[in-house]
Image: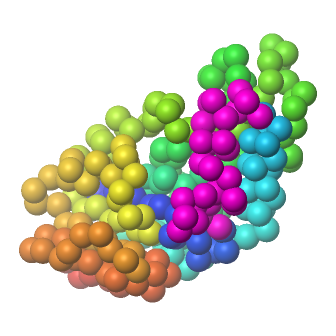
């Protein structure tokens, strides 16, 4: 069975990662446009670099949880692709082999001059860290106002899936939220979130719980169906 799994901040939160945005809309006390937009980077690059340095340091202190591991294990029985809005590498560390990062990757940086010049980066990124062409490096993150280059790939994968699992995301942030529209009429949909934004129907199964408990239940349901 072809399974497309859409994951969001909720699955990483259970590993101890902060989900960036608080209930008041601020990210670590900052307006989102200060730390996650090209304009914010142009105004105060040191603030933006330090914001992501903190995220990177925190990521290196945590590990994948039971939900990440269960999704990786599912590859033994099914053809699985993970489409994640998360910028962490917890799916990779859990053992998943096909991962599409919609919003970039925290452990990579790229040139501000040539966006195809991407490199692995686990240290702090500072003003003065340059690419080979002597241009400032920036986080390899899709900021607000920037195109989401992998969205078309994600659309194709969802449209080809026999089953779609949605884990730890409100499905309120576009363009990722629109992916569910591309599921085929016969595809099963399993939605796992403590506060689900959609209701159960004849083809949508909703698990109103956290990822670490909901994902194994959804996998069990998928295996019994297949």
Residue closer to the observer: 158 or 195: 195
- Vertical comparison of 61 with 219: above or below: above
Residue found farthest to the right: 128
* Quarter that holds the N terminus: bottom left
* Quarter that holds the C terminus: bottom left
Q: Is residue 86 left or right of residue 3?
A: right
> Residue 102 placed where, x, y %?
48, 44
Residue at 34 percent of width and 83 percent of height: 208
Residue at 33 percent of width and 65 percent of height: 165
Q: Which of the 4 image quarters holds residue 151?
A: top left
- Vertical comparison of 57 with 225: above or below: above
| Span colored in magenta | 18-44
Residue closer to the observer: 100 or 204: 204
Q: Is residue 87 visible?
A: yes
> Residue 168 placed where, x, y %?
44, 69
Residue at 86 percent of width and 47 percent of height: 123
Residue found farthest to the top: 133
> Residue 58 placed where, x, y %?
77, 63
């Amino acid at each position: 069975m072809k399974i497309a799994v859409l994951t969001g901040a909720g699955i990483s939160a259970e590993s101890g990662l902060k989900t960036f945005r608080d209930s008041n809309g601020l990210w670590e006390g900052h307006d989102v446009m200060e730390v996650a937009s090209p304009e914010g980077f142009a105004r105060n690059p040191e603030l933006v670099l330090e914001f992501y340095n903190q995220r990177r340091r925190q990521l290196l202190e945590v590990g994948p949880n039971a939900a990440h591991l269960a999704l990786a294990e599912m590859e033994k029985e099914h053809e699985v692709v993970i489409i994640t809005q998360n910028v962490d590498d917890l799916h990779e560390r859990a053992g998943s082999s096909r991962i599409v990062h919609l919003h970039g990757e925290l452990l990579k940086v790229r040139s501000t001059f040539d966006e195809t010049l991407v490199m692995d980066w686990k240290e702090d990124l500072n003003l003065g860290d340059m690419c080979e062409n002597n241009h400032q490096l920036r986080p390899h993150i899709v900021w607000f106002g920037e195109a989401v280059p992998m969205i078309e790939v994600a659309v194709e994968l969802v449209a080809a899936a026999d089953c779609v699992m949605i884990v730890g995301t409100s499905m309120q942030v576009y363009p990722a939220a629109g992916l569910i529209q591309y599921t085929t009429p016969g595809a099963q949909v399993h939605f796992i979130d403590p506060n689900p934004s959609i209701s159960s129907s004849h083809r949508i199964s909703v698990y109103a719980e956290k990822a670490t408990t909901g994902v194994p239940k959804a996998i069990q349901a998928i295996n019994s169906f297949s």
